């Protein structure tokens, strides 16, 4: 399906996903959620893609949910209207999944690094959408807000899991409890973003980081490492990580990328890693996050169901 509310472009082994409703500051809708899930699935399946960059067109990353009539979101629910369900969003616990989770969890399931290049407002779902992404770079114009309590609701998009793990429970609770909008400097102090750059340098900085990853590392190794790092955030013991890493190292040691990496190092040349990511499964590395038994997927969601 050709997307109508985002652009998906691949160049130099980097997929760039651009939220594209600039006249509405890229306000989030049910259609956008479904298209984001499809874009994540496309990037995950394409061996030509090594890194994903997500940004917004125009003056905003995403100013939050579109609360106007017919957008298929919270505003329609408050008015008692039926939700638009353009592609099916699945259920969890017997209830329709929140659209934020439909959009964000496919990025968690990706086996490729995801960089959020945040320009202008990133409020509500505009902020929580970025949390499963691995690196967030903010323009000086960026503004963030976990404003849900000011709308009478709780955070969505699985952000009650992600946000405390990204910034710590104290900082997460301060931002959620106050619901205030804060600037890029505060986001940097709170470790929500890794750096702040001038607006004109935002996309060049994101693409430079993406190129550094794509040009110098093994896609298979990066994919396995991403799954390990995220999945082990919930592991009860470092022995779980030790077990998984031991199995992964044993499998990868006999692969072509290890031979190429060692040869390139000894020859003092740049490596040329050629092993395809394929299904991405490496022994000992759990596919993450595995959907629970009470969840039913929307069509085409990346990483679903994935082996336990």
Image (cartoon, rainbow, N blue to C red):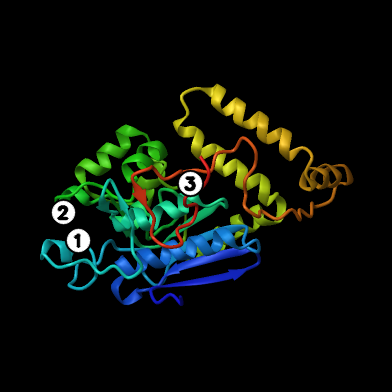
Whole-percent x, y for residue 78 in the image? 12, 61
Q: Residue 80 appears in which quarter of the rendering?
A: bottom left
Location of mark 3 (residue): 194
Q: Please, which residue is most extreme toward the right here? A: 267
Location of mark 1 (residue): 74
Tell us which disc is closer to us: 1 or 2. Answer: 1
- Earlier-in-chain disc, 2 versus 3: 2
Q: Residues within 10 Å of mark 3 (few under 14, many from 20)?
A: some
Return the residue nearer the eye: 173 or 92: 92
Return the residue nearer the eye: 256 or 307: 307
Return the residue nearer the eye: 121 or 129: 129
Tell me which residue sits at (42%, 64%) in the image.
Answer: 36
Tell me which residue sits at (73%, 40%) in the image.
Answer: 252
Tell us which disc is closer to us: 2 or 3. Answer: 2
Horizontal side of residue 283 vs 198, given as left or right: right
Location of mark 2 (residue): 151
Callout 1: helix, strand or loop? helix
Whole-percent x, y for residue 13 in the image? 64, 63
Vertical side of 188 occupied by 90: above or below: below
Horizontal side of residue 212 vs 91, given as left or right: right
Tell me which residue sits at (33%, 57%) in the image.
Answer: 90
Q: Whole-Å distance between the Cαs marked 2 and 3?
A: 28 Å
Callout 2: helix, strand or loop? helix
- Earlier-in-chain disc, 3 versus 1: 1
Tell us which disc is closer to us: 3 or 1. Answer: 1
Total numbered labels placed on residues in the image: 3
- Earlier-in-chain disc, 1 versus 2: 1
Q: Residues within 10 Å of mark 2 (few under 14, many from 20)?
A: few
> Is label 1 in contact with label 2 (beta carbons under 8 Å)?
yes
Q: Please, which residue is most extreme toward the left here? A: 79
């Amino acid at each position: 399906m050709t997307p109508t509310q985002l652009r998906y472009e691949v160049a130099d082994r980097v997929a760039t996903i651009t939220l594209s409703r600039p006249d509405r500051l890229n306000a989030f809708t049910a259609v956008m959620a479904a298209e984001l899930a499809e874009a994540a699935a496309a990037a995950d399946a394409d061996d030509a893609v090594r890194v994903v960059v997500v940004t917004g067109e125009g003056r905003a990353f995403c100013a939050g949910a579109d609360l106007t009539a017919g957008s298929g979101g919270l505003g329609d629910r408050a008015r008692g209207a039926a939700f638009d369900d353009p592609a099916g969003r699945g259920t969890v616990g017997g209830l329709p999944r929140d659209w934020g989770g439909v959009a964000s969890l496919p990025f968690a399931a990706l086996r490729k690094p995801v960089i959020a290049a945040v320009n202008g407002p990133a409020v509500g779902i505009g902020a929580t959408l970025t949390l499963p992404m691995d690196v967030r770079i903010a323009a000086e114009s960026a503004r963030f807000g976990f404003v849900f309590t000011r709308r009478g609701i709780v955070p969505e998009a699985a952000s009650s899991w992600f946000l405390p793990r990204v910034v710590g429970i104290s900082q997460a609770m301060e931002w959620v409890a106050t619901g205030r909008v804060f600037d890029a400097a505060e986001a940097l102090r709170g470790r929500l973003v890794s750096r702040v750059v001038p607006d004109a340098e935002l996309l060049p900085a994101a693409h430079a980081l993406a190129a550094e990853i794509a040009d110098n590392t093994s896609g298979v190794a990066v994919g396995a490492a991403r799954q390990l790092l995220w999945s082990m955030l919930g592991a009860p013991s470092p022995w779980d990580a030790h077990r998984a890493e031991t199995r992964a190292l044993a499998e990868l040691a006999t692969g072509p990328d290890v031979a190429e990496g060692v040869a390139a190092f000894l020859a003092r040349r740049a490596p040329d890693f050629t092993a395809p990511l394929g299904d991405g499964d490496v022994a000992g590395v759990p596919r993450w996050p595995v959907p629970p038994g009470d969840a039913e997927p929307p069509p085409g969601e990346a990483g679903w169901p994935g082996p336990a």
